[in-house]
Image (spheres, helix red, strand yellow):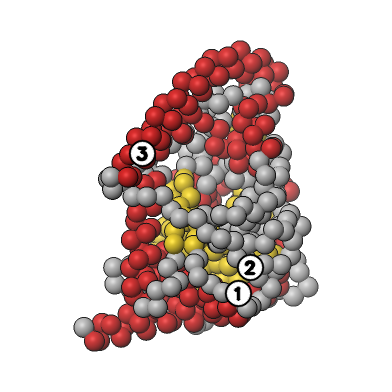
Amino acid sequence: MAPQDATMYWLSRRTHNDLFLLYCFADSGRPAAELRALVARRSAHIPDLRLRLREVPADLDYPSWIPCDFAPEQFMEHRPAESNWPTVLKVLGKLLGTVLDATVRPWRLHLFRDVIGVPSQLPDAGPATVVVLQMSHALADGRRAAQIARALFSESAATDQERTGSPPRTPLPRWAPAGSALLDSARTAAVLGLLRTPNQVIRTAVRGYHAYRSQQKLAELTATGQVPAPGPGFTPSLVNPATEVGDSDRRVRMIVCTPDQLRTPDRTVTVVVLTAISLALTRYLESRGAQVDRLGAQVPMALPGVSTPRNNYRSLGVDLFVAEPDIRLRSRRIADALGDRMARAGHPLLAAQDRVTAVVPAALLRRDIDRYPLDTVPDSIAGHTVVSSVHRGPADLTFGGGRVLFTAGFPALGSVMHLTHGVHGLSEDAEGRGATITISIHADVAALPDIDVYSDLLVAALSEIARAHEAADEAG
């Protein structure tokens, strides 16, 4: 298991960092038992859904993935007294405060049937099936999780897999010969980990020195303007209180849009949403008596290429330029800042620290994670909110025969981030249907007591941005 993924697992013991992927489908009317059988059958052909973690005694080595079969408790049907959208939102807020034990099962599917009043771009949308796929962050990052969900909800992929017959075998670790009993022995893994530790310590020291030299070189390139500067720090705001979120009251809201509603010239959807958040969050904080001089957002960026870690991304701190009154100019500055942060994050010199982490002994990394002060808010933070944007492919997904209506996601809350946003889209299917983009709001009530007020401000900001660009086009 890669150290990055082990970090996510060990963090789950201290905070709630599971992924929650929501997919809303037209309700096909099929019984829940049939849907459970469908999930069991399809998951058997998806290697990532046939795993669980095995820990190593005393953390003498990193946990490893071992095979496991689907268990009935991984399919959970919720039957609230009222099957409507507000009730689903209320239950979802409680689910977001839960965390899976990846050593038992690293994923679970939550099902809501015959849901009335879901947000939809279809005027004739009837009752819906809402599916929430919960995953341990150790299993996947946002991009990989979307690929797993696509395999689970894609009719064509499922047919191709099921036609092959038996499920694929989970590959053994590179050090274990085929048929080896070593896989079944955590003690053996601990002994092997202990034997590797001296070499890992030496490699950590050597790579640490090279990382130090890389940092010096990066600083020189930054000073000469060859590499963009790192993102600025920000003073915490009212949405970054020094309160624990473990058992907090969480609320969620979703704004389902068509791509046309978020399409502006030369701007990505992510930049449009960041600009809208800059307007809405400023106005919300000012309504609570705060003076807003600067705001920033943390934006996770997937790293390119196929990598061994299941979690392969960096978080970028982006200034939202709230002091700039011109919306179009503010949007341009946000786009430029995001581009600079991405260019810096992708520089090869930054990978030197990743190479250090790759060889750190498991026990040392676990100790550092256990000691890290998660319950405090520093004087300077990388952003006031998180904005995670993931494209989840074409809208050709189905579940039990019902076509997908929209998808959403909810970045986790933490000691600093009590307000997060998800931006998740589906593009048109082969018949040109189903393109949607959902902006999700996930908040701790202690930090954002009026989530509906904030949601309305965000909707208004999106419309304001569209009008500003339309006016500029007409004038120019």
Which of marks 1 and 2 precedes in the sequence?
Answer: 2
Above or below residue 399? Residue 454 is below
Q: Is residue 334 left or right of residue 46?
A: left
Q: In which quarter of the image is residue 384?
A: bottom right
Q: Which residue is drawn at 31% across and 83% down?
A: 470
Q: What numbered label is drawn on residue 290?
A: 1
Tell me the CA gap for discs 3 and 2. 34 Å
Q: In this view, does 348 lie to the left or right of 189?
A: left
- The reply to whether callout 3 and callout 2 are in contact (CB within 8 Å) is no
**Image coordinates for residue 281, horizontal then vertical, percent:** 54, 72
Above or below residue 291? Residue 421 is above
For label 3, the residue is: 218
Tell me the CA gap for discs 2 and 1. 8 Å
Q: Can residue 172 be seen in this view?
A: no
Image quarter hosting the N terminus? top right
Total labels drawn: 3
Q: What numbered label is drawn on residue 252?
A: none
For label 2, the residue is: 238
Give the amino acid type for the residue marked by disc 1 in the picture.
Ala
- The reply to whether callout 2 and callout 1 are in contact (CB within 8 Å) is yes
Q: Which residue is drawn at 71% across and 18% down?
A: 187
Within 10 angstroms of label 2, few (less than 14), some, or many (20 or more) residues?
Answer: some
Name the element at disc 3: helix
